[in-house]
Image: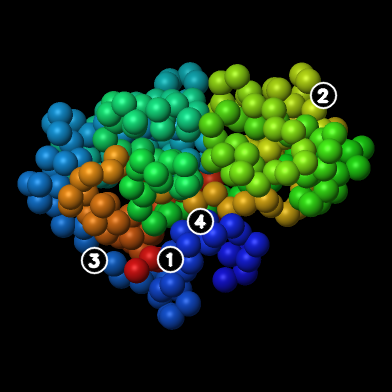
Amino acid sequence: MKRVRGVPVFYRIVLMSALVLATIGGNVDAAAPAAKVTAEVVRELAPTGTLRAAINLGNSVMAQKDERTGQLGGVTVELANELGKRLGVPVSLVQFNAAGKVFEAMQQGQLDVAFIAVEPARAAELDFTAPYVLIEATYMVRNDSPLKVIADVDRPGVRIAVGRGSAYDLYLTRTIKNAAIVRSATGGCCSMIDLFVADKLEAVAGVRQQLVAHSGSDPSMRIMRDRFMDVPQAVATRKGRTVTPAFLHAFVEEMKASGFVAAALKRSGQAGAVVAPAAP
């Protein structure tokens, strides 16, 4: 329950719904009923006969691409392929470099499912499952920066680099009162870090693992120990579908309970990411 403290209402609802079973004795290792595939589920989820699944390469915790072979990997790739297998349809992995671009494609009806962070602005148009993974968003600053903790950042004169259209961009846009938010032109990893370095900004916001990867090759940088938000990663579909939400909810819970999500994270070298607790 500690992870929920200090989180705004929308995220508190998302995380609390995921934590309910854990607080009454359930956990991600408990058995979950298998998601039942029906003809109607297949028609709704794959109306073209192919499951069009968005893979956001801008979040390297969730998806990765081998630059030499072009092969895709990561938990979202494995979930998409498993979902297509359950439905009995081929899967088209549609690649994006930023979550904002995924959301635009979903709005235009170009995709059937997306693996992106739950966010109020997106939830107005998309249906989300409960989270399957929780990741932290924090700040990176230079070693000599006077900014030490999260609360130090929201002050006049501080400029924060963010990836355009990312979950933390949308979150900080709502919550930052005094600092200035500076958005990268394209979004995705690691455009916000490039912007931070090039324009000599005071801080850069991002997923902890991505910031850690950069700081490992740049000893002049420091990552804050605390976080400004938890980023719940979930499966999204367009609103208006009848049976899809319940099916995807059961699918995600089964993937968590069976160890599928944890194993996929480990295979892709992201064992530090946290599998979300079971949801009702």
Sequence-first tag of 1 and 4: 4
Image depth: mark 4 or mark 2 in front: 4
C-alpha span from label 2 to label 1: 40 Å
> Which residue position is annotated with label 2?
200
Sequence-first tag of 2 and 1: 1
Q: In this view, does 187 lie to the left or right of 57?
A: right
State the SS at label 1: helix
Sequence-first tag of 3 and 2: 3
Relative vertical location of residue 31 with respect to residue 151 in this rendering, above or below: below
Q: Is residue 199 left or right of residue 3?
A: right
Front one among 151 and 31 = 151
Q: Report the amino acid beneath label 1.
A: Ser
Report x, y in % for residue 258.
33, 61
C-alpha span from label 4 to label 2: 33 Å
Q: How crowded is mark 4: few (under 14 residues within 10 Å), some or many (20 or more)?
A: few
Q: How crowded is mark 2: few (under 14 residues within 10 Å), some or many (20 or more)?
A: few
Q: How crowded is mark 3: few (under 14 residues within 10 Å), some or many (20 or more)?
A: few
Quadrant the C terminus occupies: bottom left
Sequence-first tag of 1 and 3: 1
Q: Report the amino acid beneath label 2.
A: Lys
Residue 141 is drawn in which quadrant? top right
> Which residue position is annotated with label 3?
33
Q: Report the amino acid beneath label 3.
A: Pro
Q: Do the residues labelled 1 and 3 touch (CB within 8 Å)?
A: no
> Which residue position is annotated with label 4?
10
C-alpha span from label 1 to label 4: 11 Å
> Which residue position is annotated with label 1?
17
Sequence-first tag of 3 and 4: 4
State the SS at label 4: helix
Image depth: mark 3 or mark 2 in front: 2
Q: Are marks 2 and 1 in contact (CB under 8 Å)?
A: no
Q: Residues within 10 Å of mark 1 (few under 14, many from 20)?
A: some
